[in-house]
């Protein structure tokens, strides 16, 4: 079992061995922001957590251990600058996962209303045009399956769309046309999870937003490709006298994003009688975020979660999720 831990540590060290500084190299950044409140409370350290349909937004291999016939989850994220992210996920697992688990995802982003401008020959250098409401949308289908008692795999294919208003494009010296600023892209996520026999220690990896370059007007850009590797374990499993009705899951993962320096997410989730949960997380190497907080309650098939993330110079980010599984 020690060799499994050494493997994870080796992969983490490789991730942080590069000195390259990466900033603002991708578009469609909304694909890298999570709306789920459980994830928000645990600093998004969800790569090795089996979370039913919500796993589509982190690691589709997390679908594989769904015991319920269906799971549906609604999440809302009040992001910075008045931006709102809403997400819906649904999954069903016939015959207790014998044939794997199929899931569907939908992510919608509302950027609010913005004032359009256009370059003009006046003292200001521009004039105001119409107000517009940019938006973004992504929907996908995923599949996860346990290939053995320990090993699971999953994949998720999605279509992403973004609208950024319209602009005036000159055709000739005396005529212009108005064009919509719209871009679309297909992206793929895939991942694996392995549960060891040592206190249920779990490690895994995921690759999110793998795609070709997207052409937007006269330029092209890449999607926010992110490689994650991490591990998780129930700390109270080492204390049998305490682990009967409660658990303390610790999850840690390293991120290798295309647009940012390498990062580390650390999350803790305390659960009592599988009903009440308290969460705490820490985000390493982020500009404005570090500590995260969250809580949740489960009443039969219904679960409700909330998370709060102080965001430095911006207002705090709050997330709420409601799910039903049976």
Image: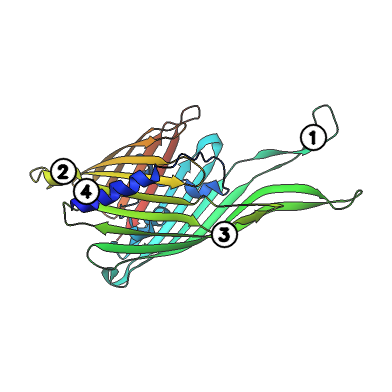
Q: CA distance from mark 2 to mark 4?
A: 14 Å
- Mark pair 3, 4: CA separation: 42 Å
Residue corresponding to mark 1: 127
Q: Quarter of the image holding residue 151?
A: bottom left
Q: Which residue is mark 2?
A: 236
- Residue shown at 33% from the left, 69% from the top: 100
Tell me the residue that label 4 is attached to: 274
Q: Disc 2 or disc 1, which is closer to the eye?
A: 2
Q: Is residue 34 visible?
A: no
Q: Position of residue 204 (x, y in %)?
A: 31, 54
Mark whose residue sits in front, 3 or 2: 3
Left or right of 240? Residue 252 is right
Which mark lies nearer to you, 2 or 4?
2
Element marked by disc 3: loop
Q: Earlier in the sequence, mark 4 or mark 1?
A: 1
Pair 4/1: label in front? 1
Can the viewer see residue 181?
Answer: yes
Question: Crowdedness of circle 4 by 10 Å Cα count: few (<14), some, many (20+)?
Answer: few
The image shows residue 70 at horizontal and vertical percentages of 34, 63
**Above or below: residue 142 compared with residue 286:** below
Q: Earlier in the sequence, mark 1 or mark 3?
A: 1
C-alpha span from label 1 to label 3:
36 Å
Q: Dot 1, crowdedness within 10 Å: few (<14), some or many (≥20)?
A: few
Q: Which mark is residue 212?
A: 3
Mark pair 3, 2: CA separation: 44 Å
């Amino acid at each position: 079992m020690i060799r499994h831990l050494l493997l994870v540590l080796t992969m983490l060290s490789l991730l942080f061995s590069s000195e390259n500084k990466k900033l603002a190299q991708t578009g469609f950044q909304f694909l890298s922001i999570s709306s789920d409140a459980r994830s928000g409370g645990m600093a998004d350290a969800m790569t090795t957590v089996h979370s039913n349909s919500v796993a589509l937004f982190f690691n589709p291999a997390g679908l594989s251990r769904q015991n319920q016939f269906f799971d549906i989850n609604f999440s809302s994220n009040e992001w910075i600058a008045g931006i709102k992210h809403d997400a819906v996920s649904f999954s069903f697992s016939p015959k207790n996962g014998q044939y794997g688990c199929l899931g569907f995802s939908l992510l919608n982003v509302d950027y609010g209303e913005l004032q359009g401008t256009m370059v003009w020959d006046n003292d200001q250098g521009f004039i105001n045009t119409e107000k517009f409401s940019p938006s973004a949308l992504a929907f996908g289908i995923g599949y996860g399956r346990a290939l053995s008692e320990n090993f699971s795999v999953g994949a998720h294919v999605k279509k992403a769309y973004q609208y950024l208003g319209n602009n005036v494009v000159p055709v000739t010296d005396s005529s212009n046309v108005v064009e919509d600023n719209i871009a679309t892209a297909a992206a793929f996520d895939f991942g694996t999870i392995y549960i060891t026999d040592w206190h249920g220690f779990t490690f895994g990896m995921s690759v999110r937003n793998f795609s070709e370059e997207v052409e937007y007007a006269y330029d092209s850009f890449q999607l926010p490709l992110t490689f994650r590797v991490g591990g998780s374990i129930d700390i109270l499993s080492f204390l049998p006298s305490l682990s009967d009705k409660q658990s303390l899951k610790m999850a840690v993962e390293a991120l290798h994003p295309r647009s940012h320096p390498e990062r580390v997410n650390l999350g803790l989730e305390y659960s009592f009688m599988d009903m009440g949960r308290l969460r705490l997380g820490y985000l390493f190497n982020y500009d404005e975020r570090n500590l995260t907080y969250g809580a949740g309650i489960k009443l039969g098939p219904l679960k409700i979660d909330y998370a709060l993330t102080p965001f430095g110079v911006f207002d705090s980010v709050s997330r709420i999720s409601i799910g039903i599984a049976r």
